Amino acid sequence: MPHDYHLKDPHTEQRLFRNRMLVALVGVVFLLGVLVARFYNLQVVNYEDYRTQSDENRIQVRPVAPTRGLIYDRNGILLADNRASYNLSIVRERVRDMDATLELIGHLVRLDDSDVAKFQKRLKRRRPFEPVPLRFRLNEDEIARISVNQFRMPGVSVEAELVRYYSLGHLFSHSVGYVGRISDRDLSNFTQDDVRRYRGTRSIGKVGLERSYEDLLLGEAGYENVEIDAHSRVLRILERQDPKPGADLTLNLDARLQQVASDALGDRRGAVVAIDVNSGGVLAFVSKPSFDPNLFVTGISFADYRALSDSLDVPLFNRAVQGQYPPGSTLKPLMGLGGLQAGVITRETKIKDPGFYKLPNDPRIYRDHIRWGHGDKVDLVQAMAQSCDVYFWDMAHRWDIDEMHSMASHFGLGTKTGIDLPMERPGLFPSRDWKRGARGMPWFPGDSLNAVLGQGFVLATPLQLAVMTATIANRGTHYRPQMVKTINGVEQPPEILHNLEANPLHWDLVFEGMEAVVNHRSGTGKRAGKGLDFRVAGKSGTAQVVGIAQGARYDSEALQERHRDHALFVAFAPVDNPRIAVSVLVENGEGGGKVAAPVARALFAEWISSPQEDQETVDTMNLSEEAGNG
């Protein structure tokens, strides 16, 4: 059987081989071209972009928080300091199982539900690889336990930072105020510039001077370029721009006088304000009850905040600038001066006081606090010394309310004083236009009788009463009250808001009446000058909290404690060369001369009679307070 034999064809095979080699070569050249093009793109076209990205993986720009400015009292006592605090922080990107990590941490240190809840909120607004604090103010034992177990918790670290500390916390909580953690509400109000300024900073001034002077106290953030490893640990600092510390504030407040005022007020609710008559500098500023501002610095617990906010005594309420109270008879010196200036009364004006007053064609009887009256010939000095209501009612009936309102305005009533503290309230001194606009009613003669005694629509803060008294004491120079004395050592000059020109004889008569309040045997404020070797001028006041029916007597025992009258007292000293003016409010204290006047006396005795505090005393005060806080 024949067989077919296929002979080998070398030419065909050679041609096939060449074709295959050509295809392979073209493929290699093409791929090489692609590779070269890619290299060119990486190394030439996009070189700067990729180099920057590479550096960002290796180099980080970290903000450096500035040191917050310090706050001192006028004698150099440190009121707001910065102290080292050790915080437990977590870098989210380095943690594989956050729940397991938090559980482990909870076995090592105390960890409340509120700590975890706040930590979760902070996680939402962090930057990549930014440490987020979980617990603040670790003690040495907690730091040691975290350090020993840190190998089990990647991403967890203990970081040191400076936090605010208030050595005389309760004493200055309503004046110095406090800082707190930056909240979502704060962030929502931030501008782009604010975001830049607060990088690296976790706190912001919330109330008091910490809030008013936030821009100066904060300082300017710096930065540093750091080289890091794959675990985000810093290997070295490549570049650094130091932050600018915040400005230091020295206050007009005197810690010694502040302590005296607080002690004199005791456990009662109220406020005390003392002002330098010749500059408007605030020497003492007390609102009680108070609170510990250190609770807020790193975030107050829910339990602590609930205890403060739910308290019937409202310790967070700044009574000195937010409390609006009827000033009562403390307005009588001002009203007397206004009546003299308006020509409604003179030095010789005398009235008969049967113990009550009636307006023409009005059946209502306005009864004096002394039912049998003050006599048949009551003049202005006696009316002030014994707080005769009938004298001032008779004057008010003959005095136009708008002129009364104008006089009150010159002394800072009915408007904010402009003090360098936030959340001040304006009080109220009414006028015809005000009543028509606010109540839709005309002004009645009885309204004037209420206004002249600081009742009815009239409201004032303890700070306004202190400013009024200081303006009387210096005979018409109305200063803006100032808490801050110097900024970084630069003196802050006094600011005059008004100058009232009045007849010197009228000033003398008002001084005589206010001095009689304290020094006359029948004066209502005798306790304000008891045992002092200089003369004091003042005026007591009592403000109703609840209305009493016409003809009824005030019965303290029949009223709940919080429904009893407020006690007020305003005064200045010494009479011949006034240096300090004081206003005192004791909520539900009833008798201004009995309860509030001794508080003013304590301040006068300390400020005028006591020698200036030396540095040894200052140091002792600081050390004793620190020991108490420890």
Image: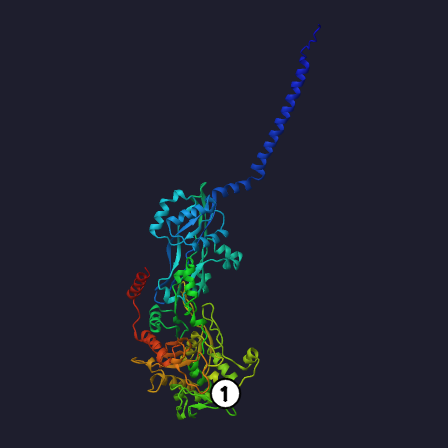
Q: Nearer the viewer, residue 166 or 237?
A: 166
Q: Element type at marker 1?
A: loop
Model colouring: rainbow
- Which image quadrant: the C terminus? bottom left
Picture quadrant where residue 388 is located: bottom left
Q: Is residue 629 left or right of residue 212?
A: left
In the orientation shown, which residue stands out farthest toward the right? 2
Q: Nearer the viewer, residue 4 or 493?
A: 4
**Residue 402 image offset from top left, x and y in percent:** 52, 83
Residue at 47%, 53% in the rendered image: 122
Q: Nearer the viewer, residue 114 or 37?
A: 114
Residue 104 visible in this rendered orientation of the protein? yes
**Residue 353 image offset from top left, x and y in percent:** 42, 92
**Residue 195 image offset from top left, x and y in percent:** 50, 55
**Residue 609 image offset from top left, x and y in percent:** 30, 75
Crowdedness near tag 1: few (<14), some (14–19) or many (≥20) residues, C-alpha within 10 Å = many
Tag 1 residue: 399
Q: Is residue 44 left or right of residue 296?
A: right
Q: Nearer the viewer, residue 196 or 599?
A: 599
Count of numbered circles in the view: 1
In the orientation shown, which residue stands out farthest toward the front? 558
Residue 277 visible in this rendered orientation of the protein? no
- Which image quadrant: the N terminus? top right
Q: Amino acid at mark 1?
A: Trp
